[in-house]
Image (cartoon, helix red, strand yellow):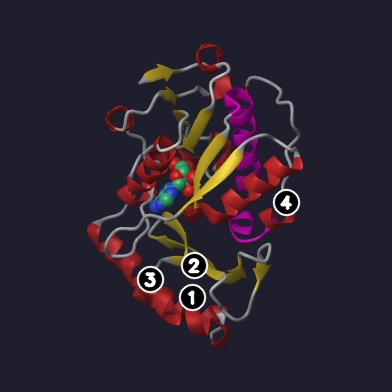
Amino acid sequence: MKIFKDKISLQKEILNKPISFIPTMGGLHKGHISLIKRSKKFKKKTLVSIFVNPRQFNKKSDYRSYPRNKLKDVSILKNLNVNYLYIPSVKDIYGFKPKHKLYLDKFSKKLCGKFRKGHFEGVINVMNRLIQIIKPKTIFMGKKDYQQLFLIKKFISRHKINSKIIECNTVRQANGVAFSSRNSLLKPNDIKIASRIYYFINKIKKKFDVYNFNFLKTEMIKLGASKVDYIENYNIKKNFIKSKKYNKNCKIFIAYYIKNVRLIDNI
Ligand code: AMP
């Protein structure tokens, strides 16, 4: 595996090579690994980036405490026979003017966009730059972050960028909790709370229309959540329309805290 810390040397290496790209913020886990394994099945070179993007954090303390484990990440990626790892500095990413303007679909105002001001601007900004540097043929992204995935797809199609997004299923622990870098900030009992919340949402989702937000929030707090940002039902097949009734085209989107750790999922 070749490791690059600056875009000039990376670009020299990958020029004219078809690239499959997996953008990450590190703290690698089985969710990331599934994306990489899927990419390895394509006859392209696999490039993983690790960049904890400061602009997508709305709180400095959250940016500072975000799990980082470079040595472990490098060892995981070597074992997976990843071709290239790009670990840029903030200057390498933000020290140039990108070709494309940021485009945020109106859905960026909903869900996490409502509770994390500037978050999706930061996400689209970094993806705009990474795509310009790498020019990937395919990009692998997880449905765990469905709103992010949707907004990046809208950005790519708006600018007619020649990169295809491959949507990958959410990988979960046996107890239902979705793998997430932030899980490493949780204690075993906190993981049990996250698991109970996962099963609770699964249990109520078919009757979602009979419950109101306050009831669901109170139930989640009883199960151990410290705070609930949202529990909303969207039809993801119909261009993300908020829906009262749950059906097979719907997902329940949740964001909540266990102590000061914010978790998101869609079930
Ligand atoms: P992150 O490092 O959290 O920015 O995530 C990098 C990529 O991994 C994103 O496309 C995520 O959606 C994806 N991802 C994160 N967790 C999971 C998971 N549990 N299952 C599948 N993909 C995931």
Q: Position of residue 126 (x, y in %)?
A: 60, 34
Q: Is residue 131 magenta?
A: yes
Q: Residues within 10 Å of mark 2 (few under 14, many from 20)?
A: many
Question: Which circle, 4 or 2, is nearer the viewer?
Answer: 4
| Residues packed near mark 3 inside 10 Å, few (<14), some (14 to 19) or many (20 plus) | many
Eyeballing the image, is 235 above or below 182?
below
Precedes in sequence: disc 1 or disc 3: 3
Q: Specify the segment rendered in magenta.
A: 109-135
In three-dimensional space, the C-alpha distance between marks 1 and 3, rounded to whole angstroms, equals 11 Å
Q: In the figure, is residue 117 to the left or right of 254?
A: right
Disc 2 residue type? Val
Q: Where does residue 160 sit, x and y in percent of width and height?
A: 74, 38
- Figure quadrant of the N terminus: top left
The residue at which mark 4 appears reads as 105
Give, as a three-letter code, the residue at label 3. Answer: Ile
**Foreground disc of the pair 1, 3:** 3
The secondary structure type at the circle numbered 1 is helix
In terms of depth relative to the viewer, which is nearer, 161 or 61? 161
Q: Please give the residue where the numbered disc 2 appears in the rendered image.
A: 228
Up/down of 118 relative to 215, above or below: above
Looking at the image, tell me whether mark 1 or mark 4 is earlier in sequence order. Answer: 4
How crowded is the residue under tag 1: few (<14 C-alpha within 10 Å), some, or many (20+)?
Answer: some
Residue 66 image-quadrant placement: top left
Q: Amino acid at mark 4?
A: Asp
Residue type for callout 1: Lys
| Badge 2 element | strand
For label 2, being within 8 Å of ligand 1 is answered: no
Disc 4 versus disc 2: distance between alpha carbons?
A: 25 Å
Q: Whole-Å distance between the Cαs marked 1 and 4?
A: 28 Å
Q: Main secondary structure of the magenta part?
A: helix
**Position of residue 147 in the picture relative to residue 176 (left or right):** right
Q: Are marks 1 and 2 in contact (CB under 8 Å)?
A: yes
